[in-house]
Amino acid sequence: MDEEFHPSWNSQHSFATRTRFKLTVESGEEEEWESLLLSGNDEVEVAVIERNPVADGSLGQDEIAEFIEETAECKPESGVQWLHDFLEQVKTVYAFSICKAATLKLEVMRCMHCDRTCGTR
């Protein structure tokens, strides 16, 4: 699993036309992005995806160390040991943050769907 995930920027148009979403580089370069914005074709921001490489002194390393510390007392011990061994091999941490506008839009759509299917009285 040494391969890094690189969105296919050449197929970005194809992705946008096949789905209702698009990816935009928020920080970094196309091949070495640090964060991406996932938004709807209607420009509503859905999520921010951050890529944190795990290296000495990096945010990714800090996140792994924190997770190992938080799970140290969990059970079963064999599962914890397996998890910690796995985490020590992780090369990149991806963090997903859901945008407030997306959750609001989802709630509105859910209400509209319920009104349409359940009826309002």
Image (cartoon, grey):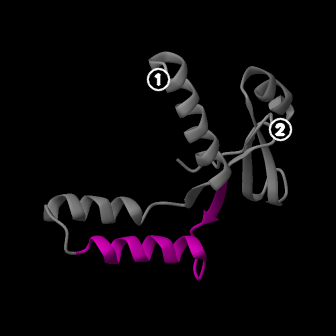
Alpha-carbon distance for marks 1 and 2?
49 Å
**Residue 55 in view of the camera:** no
Assess whether residue 62 is covered by the magenta stretch: yes
Residue 9 numbered tag: 2
- Give the percent coordinates (x, y) of residue 26: 80, 58
- The answer to whether 105 appears left or right of 63 in the picture is right
Identified at 42% across, 76% down, the residue is 65
Q: Are marks 1 and 2 in contact (CB under 8 Å)?
A: no
Q: Nearer the viewer, residue 11 or 121?
A: 121
Classed neighbour count for the residue bearing mark 1: other residues with Cα under 10 Å, few (<14), some (14–19), many (≥20): few
Front residue of 106/37: it is 106
Q: Position of residue 85 (x, y in %)?
A: 33, 63
- Which amino acid type is marked by label 2? Trp
Query: Reading the chain from its start, which is encountered first: label 1 or label 2?
Result: 2
Q: At x 73% / y 41%, what residue is drawn?
A: 7
Q: What is the residue that sits farthest to the left in this orientation?
A: 76
Q: Position of residue 23 (x, y in %)?
A: 77, 42
Residue bounds of the magenta highlight: 48-72
The residue singled out by tag 1 in the image is: 121
Whether residue 22 is visible:
yes
